[in-house]
Structure formats: structure tokens, C-alpha cells
Amino acid sequence: MSDASAASFDFDLIVIGAGYGGFDAAKHAADHGLRTAIVESRDMGGTCVNRGCVPSKALLAASGRVRELADVEHLRGFGIHAAPVRFERQKIADHANQLVATIRTNLTKTLERAGATILRGKGRLEGSQRVAVREASGIERVYSARDVIIATGSDPFVPPGIETDGRTVFTSDEAISLEWLPRWIAIIGSGYIGLEFADVYTALGCEVTMIEALDRVMPTFDPDIAKIAARNLIDGRDIDARSGVLAKSVTPGSPVRIELVEMASREPVEILEVDAVLVATGRVPVSKDLNLASVGVTTNRGFIPVDEAMRVLVDGNPVPHLWAVGDVTGKMMLAHTAAAQGGVAVDNILGHQRLIDYRSIPAATFTHPEISSVGLSEADAKELAAADGFELGLVRSYFKANSKALAELESDGLMKLLFNRSSGEVLGAHIYGLHAADLIQEIANAVARRQSVRELAHEVHTHPTLSEVVEVAYKQAAATLV
């Protein structure tokens, strides 16, 4: 492109949305000399920084300490006798708020230092290579850009029949401010958000009822991992978990009224009256006010279709100069997936062809202990094995055989490794146990490189560390190769 035609645009790139995906895309673009603008109508940092990963990890860190100090039996195993634990709810909440403020400030400064222009307001498309930004004052400006990345993210999903008031019935958006501790709280949904908040609330002395519409609790997790994790994270705590039941209606108030019906038959089960309800039923894309029709894009349940280069698609064909990243694409709704997609989109804009590899992106749930996974589920791996004509290998490695886990008196844990028994290629892993979120990275790297357990079995791990759980799995797997 000649300088003259480049100069005819206000920017080389406009990113709509300053969450984790938009931030990474804008920073990467600005660092590589593109004249970049990023549009944000809410808080810089999006869901992850303000209402998701960051504040929730602060709450989990504090409540995890409370849980540890209050676990008399566990401490007794070390010969430790602690005084009854006391905590200040407000100070725990303040810790989360201060962390959010710090990270939001850092992120904004990083963008400014990189040379990106921050446009405050609500962005939408105005046809090809044009973005309209409506400022809070109502003033609207239209900017042109050679390329546009949509990174508008997602919001919590509230199912029909559930009424929220932000105080007695709320989503994770409000839960992270920890304004009060309900004596009895119902959590609707047993995915990672429901589990993490159940961990926080039970550590801080609340009673929890978990309501899952699907026929098993923790339905999105590997069944074997879910079984061992539920034993500790649900059965071992003040949690009454019910599966196969639907919250047909939830009415805010004091108490909150929940009408439960059987999921299969829709027959009434009971009316529950609790102090509060957290709705943790997943997330929906933010795409309806983007004026996607102006470029002919049709969403799929609100999600914007993209290819693996992050180009937006219409009838399977890329729309020129239009890209989308993050939750709005509905691929893996995780902050680090959004960041990875942002990097891929910008690399392609810069002319370096690159595709995203979802199989190597890990996921973690920050309960105590943690749950993590990467690559294929066992069901998907079986399907792939049948389709490609190879035998699927599966080994289990237990924390109770690990010296470090035993030293910590935290030996309840399992790693499950999936691999191709002919080539040895690692296809996926699922871990429950101490520091599972950190341990998964090693397997994620192996999946990214499509490595075989043949080589991996020879890699030396520090003794005594939890990483030896992975080493044992690799060695077991290598021994079964055909």
C-alpha cells in the first residue's frame, strides 16, 4: 500500500473493545508501527480486569487463606494449632477493588506508551472500514481505518424466568464486589464461575445450594476429574448440590424465592427460599449494537463467525479488512484465548500469516485445589481416534504418589493424559489437584508442538516437585506405545 492511500485513513487499525483481546491486539499493532485506536465505552480492561479473572482471583486468594487457617484437621496433621480465624469482609473486598484499579491503570498506561489512541465511547460499524463512536455526551464521530477488529466481549447470561436486582439476585459482575455475605446462597450453574464462587462463599462461612440443570454436577469437566473434584470441592463442604433441576423462576427479595422443576419433565420439585442467588449460567456475546448488517455479517446466536486467522466470515468467505477476537467469537471464552486471538489477527494484518491453535490453549478453575485442562476431551479424542484410525492411549497419574503433595498433606489429586498410542502425540490432559493451573502449562506446550511422549518421557523434572506428576504420566504413556 502506498503512503498516499494509507494516509487517506484516520487510522491503520481501530479496535472496538478494550478487554483482554482488544488490549493485546491494540498493543501488538501499536508496537509494530500501526496507527492504532481502541474504542471503549465501559472500564478499560473489560470483563477480565474489572468483573472477572482479576477480582475473582483476589477474592479466591483471600478466602483460600481463610479456608487454610480454619482447617483444624489439616493443620493438626502438621502439629499446628491455630487460633479461631477472623476476617474482615470489607478488607477482602477492598483487596479485590484495589487490584482491579492497579491493573486497569497499568493497562491504560501501557496502551498510551505504545502510542495507541484511546477513544472513549460506544463503537459500531458504519459500513466497510468505518467506525462510528458515540461519546457519553451523545456526540458521534465517524473514523476510517484500513482494518477493524471487533473485540466487544460478553456479558453474563441470565436465563428467562430469572429476575435480577443486583443485590439479592445477581451475576458474577456484582458478586466480585463482595458487598455482603448471605447466610444461605443458591448458585445456579456448576461451571467454573459457579465453582469458584462456591469456593469463596463456603470459605467465608456461607451455606451454598448449587443448582445444575444438566444431569450431572460439573458437566463441562472431564467426568473422572469431576468425580474426584466434587468429592472435595462440593461433598466435603457446606454445599447441597442438585443436578437435573431447573430454576424455572427466581424472584428477588428477602428471602429470594426459587421455583425448582425437574429438567426432564418440568414437574415441580420444590420452592426454595434463600438469602441470595448467584446466576452463573454462562455468558452471551455483546454484538447486537455493532451494526453488523452494514457489512452483511450475520451472527450465530450473537457470536461473530471467524476463521482461524480471525477474519470475519459471511457465508464462509472473509469480509475484507474486518476481524473479530475474544468472547464475541464464542470459541473458547477465556481471557488468554482472546489475547492469543488478538495477536493472531494483528499478525495477519501485518502480513505474517498465522492461524490460532485452540487445542493448545489451557483452561483452569481456581478452586482449592485447582482444576485444569488442555487439548481434547476424552470423548473428542475417542472420536478423533476412530476417524483417523489410531488407538487412543489413556493413563492416570496420582498426586498420592508424589512426594511434594504428600509433604503438603495435599495428596488428593489426579492427572489424566490422552495420547495417540502409535505416534505418541499428546492429545490432551485433565488435572485436579494442588497447583493444577500451573502444571497444565507443560502439557499445553507439548500439545502446541505436537510432541510425542517418546521424547517427553526422557525430560528430567525437579525432585521433589508437583511437576513429577506430569513426568510419571509421560513415562507411563511411553511404556504403552504400540
Image (cartoon, rainbow, N blue to C red):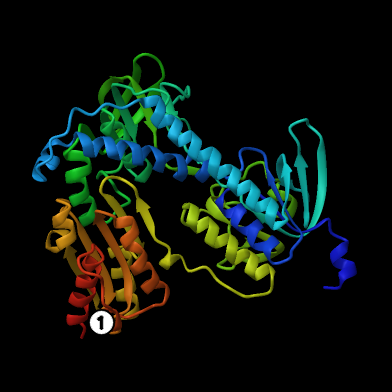
Is 34 on the left-hand or right-hand side of 155?
A: right
Residue under the point 63% across and 37% down: 42
Q: Nearer the viewer, residue 58 or 441?
A: 58
Could you say which quadrant of the image residue 307 lies in?
A: bottom right
Question: x and y percent of residue 140 in the render?
Answer: 81, 38
Q: Nearer the viewer, residue 422 or 437?
A: 437
Residue under the point 28% across and 64% down: 378
For the N terminus, which image quadrant? bottom right
Residue at the outermost top position: 254
Question: x and y percent of residue 276 in the render?
Answer: 36, 23
For the C terminus, which image quadrant? bottom left
Name the residue type under label 1.
His
Q: Nearer the viewer, residue 278 or 19?
A: 19
Question: x and y percent of residue 62 in the render?
Answer: 34, 37
Q: Is residue 15 above or below residue 420?
A: above
Could you say which quadrant of the image residue 10 lies in?
A: bottom right
Q: Is residue 302 above or below residue 345?
A: above
Q: Is residue 467 above or below residue 46?
A: below
Q: Is residue 317 visible?
A: yes
Residue with the mark numbered 1: 458
